[in-house]
Structure formats: structure tokens, C-alpha cells
Image: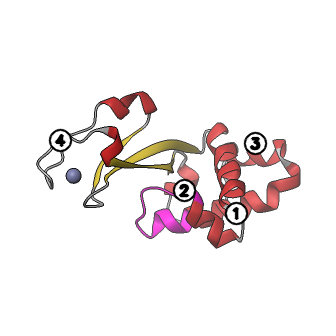
Amino acid sequence: MSSPRFERVKRSNPRIAELLDQLGMYIQNQIQSGQTFVLPKLAGAALRLNDGEAFVLLEILATGGLLRRIYNLYCRKTGVLLATVDDPRQLDEIPHCDYCDEDHQLQDLKVELAFAPNDALFTKAA
Ligand SMILES: [Zn+2]
């Protein structure tokens, strides 16, 4: 399992290359089983890391161009995913919630930080 970008990230972070390999494998499995994004909390649980450590590793892959940081917007009342945006500035453009038939304000939403695959490493069949 590799790609030029992934090798570059591992070369610049030799002390955590093994962890990055484990994380890369985890992401690949998630995407191949139909997930469209990875959550730091779940990645951390899978790798026995805390949320902060998992977040930093995912950020390193995002900086290396392998992942894209995204924000999932959920209706707080119903838990329904309303939108996924790439840029926090888009949080202003919250779509109409069909479940509540309301235009929710930001405080009526749950915002979740996630990472979407951005490299053939994760999307190619193994
Ligand atoms: Zn709603």
C-alpha cells in the first residue's frame, strides 16, 4: 500500500512512519467498506490513540495532500446530516432542514470535523 504522496509524508515524518502506515491502512479499509470520510475519534479508537493524537496524524496526511479536511453539519434535533462543506466560511450557507422544515441557525447544528480521502491510495481497489 503506497503512493508517491504517502511516501513523501512518511519520509518527512520518519519517527511516526509506522503509525502513519497503520492509519493509512485504517483509512483504506474504511473507504473500501463504503465510508466517505474518517472521524478522528474513530481512527483514534482503532489505533489506540487519543482523539488529539489521531487528529494530528490526520492533519499530517491532510497537509501532505492525502486527505481533505471537511465539516459535516448535522441537525441537532434529528441528527440528520444536512451538508458537508470544505470551508468553515460556508457554515453561513446552512441548507434548509427538510426534517424540521426550518432554516436552522448555527447553534441548532452539530458541527463535526472529518477527513475525506484525496489520494488514489485510499480510493483504488487493493
Ligand atoms: Zn432540523
Identify the mark nearer the N-term, 4 or 2: 4
Which residue is rendered at x = 27% and y = 37% of the image?
Answer: 94
- The residue furthest front is 107
Q: Which amino acid type corresponds to the residue marked 1 in the rendered image?
A: Asn
Q: Which residue in the structure is indicated by mark 3?
A: 8
**Residue 46 coordinates in the image, percent (x, y):** 63, 72
**Residue 10 coordinates in the image, percent (x, y):** 78, 49
Question: Disc 1 to disc 4, how far (Cα)?
Answer: 35 Å
Q: Residues in magenta?
A: 28-40
Q: Which amino acid type corresponds to the residue marked 4 in the rendered image?
A: His
Q: Secondary structure at mark 3?
A: helix
Quadrant assignment for the C terminus: bottom right
Q: Which residue in the structure is indicated by mark 2?
A: 122
Q: Residues within 10 Å of mark 2 (few under 14, many from 20)?
A: many
Which residue is rendered at x = 37% and y = 34% of the image?
Answer: 91
**Of labels 4 and 2, the one closer to you:** 4
